[in-house]
Image (cartoon, rainbow, N blue to C red):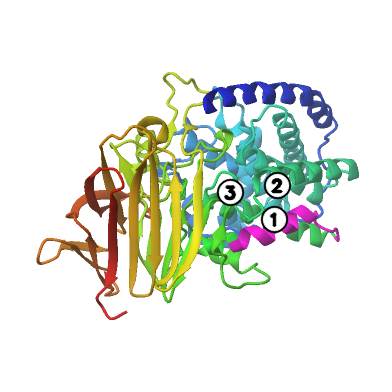
Amino acid sequence: MKRAGFIASQGASSLARALRAPYYFVKAMGVRAPERLHVAPQDIRTADPTVADEIYAGYFSFDGKIVAMQGRSPFSIQPPSAAWRRSLAGFSWLRHLQAADKALARANARALADDFLLSRNIFVDDPAFEPPVVARRTLSWLAQSPILLEGADQEFYERFMNSLGGNVRMLMRALAHEPPGLDRLTCAVALAEFGVCADAGRKFQDCATDLLDAELARQISSDGGHVGRNPQALVDLLLDLLPLRQAYAVRGRRPPERLLACIERMIPMLRMMQHGDGSLALFNGMSVASPDSLATILAHDEAPGAPPLDAPQSGYRRIEAGDALVIVDAGGPPPLEYSGAAHAGCLSFEYSIGGERLVVNCGAPASGSDVSRRIARATAAHSTLVVEDRSSCEIAGEAGFGRRLAGRIVAGPREVIADRRSAASGEWLEFSHDGYAREFGLLHRRKLALTSAWLVGEDQLVTLGAEQANDFVLRFHVHPNVALSPTGDGCGIDIVSPGGIRLTFEVEGLTPAIEESVFFAAPGAPRRCAQIVVAGRALPEAHVRWSFTRVDGG
């Protein structure tokens, strides 16, 4: 049903884009190369001057692949991967040359940019001209324009401005065809920033601002989350939106109200997703978060306070007790067009104490094979209950679905319920999802209660139709730095963190086991870790009660 609805909606969207196409093409035709740039937005992404030395030496490292140029231009070689080419052509690495603050680095930046400007498209379907890459290149060139244009000769200056204008025309045309998604919002941000920074004219500025306003309204929820439910999307967007807000101020212009409102909602949402060590919870495509980037973003919070506990539109809940913290995925899959990176992790949770993460999800690989990404998206890669080794969501492959749907979630929980209750023992979170209803006729219910001394949980599979017994597994993946061992009586699991936090895991009526797992969200490369596994049989009205109890006096 959902798949048929998506196909129908895609037909309607295609028609709408076809009707809008002439408008965007006319707007694109009216864009001319700017004569000057009035302001260069600040690039607030972390910069490393040592990378400038590597680039000068001819080493370009992107997406896990290092290429030695040996005197060649990086824009003239066959790229080792499409992802490497995207990163190269996005020019985000210019910030490292700017951070070096040397005449040599500036000359190197301009020479490399000129290599690109003078190069010819020698690759079929060159990723350098994909709309999100063009948008990133536009944002990078605007931010780093001082090092590119300072002392430049007239010929380079004109080539650069002509290419900048060409980028904007490509982005305008792309908006007639690009499907909705985060890439579309990035294109809108690039157009708005060009409108503020260049002498683009008031009509173009107003048009670009309207496009940005529409995409922010479509993609940022009222609680500050992104419709795709990936915390990384908030990080990436804020690293672009905060400089854009500043650029409006430098030009003496009032930023759009929706831009200001979205930023004010998005930063608290990031706080909600943070553990005590500063990292973000690993849900729906989240991988390694840059601590420097997070710190930079959070420093812009004009009214810092306690993070919110509930984000019902985005589908996340948080519960705190002393230095203990649990964050729960309590939402269904995103709309199909935004679900390309989402995970089948409904009702999974992460648990930390102080600055130590204990129970985690496996997270998403920062780079790597499609196989790893598929494994990371499965329900079994999350700290939740799995029925018959099936995921609670169906993720489309290319076979039988075609490229249009490939990688998107085409079936999953339709109704996810989350409630917060108070009891004498403390606060409870109660959840349910129907992701296993269609295939097995089962509803998964989960309860969680937290104090500084323990985390207690209860899972139940409720039969919705004819009674049947199904195998289930409860999985609790633990951080790679956490050590697990059976208790002396073999009925529980001892847990020890690097900082000396000690807990015991126990489960009523069943015996937990320790199995291998993988932590995809480790810096550099995936790491081995362990998981606590509780296997059982789903019988009518059966409850599985489990607990993590601190034994270190915490």
Amino acid carrying mark 2 in the image: Leu
Q: In the picture, residue 179 is in which quadrant?
A: top right
Residue at the image position 55 percent from the left and 35 percent from the top: 75
Q: Nearer the viewer, mark 1 or mark 3?
A: 1
2 and 1 marks in contact (CB < 8 Å): yes
Q: Tell me the distance, in whole angstroms, between the alpha carbons under discs 1 and 3.
A: 24 Å
Residue position for label 3: 92
- Mark 2–mark 1 Cα distance, whole angstroms, equals 7 Å
Q: Which residues are magenta?
A: 252-268
Q: Are marks 1 and 3 in contact (CB under 8 Å)?
A: no
In the structure shown, which secondary structural element does the residue marked by tag 2 occupy? helix
Residue 440 coordinates in the image, percent (x, y): 35, 33
Task: First in sequence, mark 1 or 3: give its number.
Answer: 3
Q: Is residue 477 above or below residue 33?
A: below
Question: Can you say which quadrant of the picture contains the C terminus?
Answer: bottom left
Residue 56 appears in view: no
State the residue at coordinates (34%, 49%). 460
Residue denoted by label 2: 216
Q: Amino acid at mark 1?
A: Cys
- At 28% from the left edge and 60% from the top edge, which residue is drawn? 546
Q: Which mark is residue 262?
A: 1
Q: Earlier in the sequence, mark 2 or mark 1?
A: 2
Image quarter for residue 243? Answer: bottom right
Q: Which mark is residue 382?
A: none
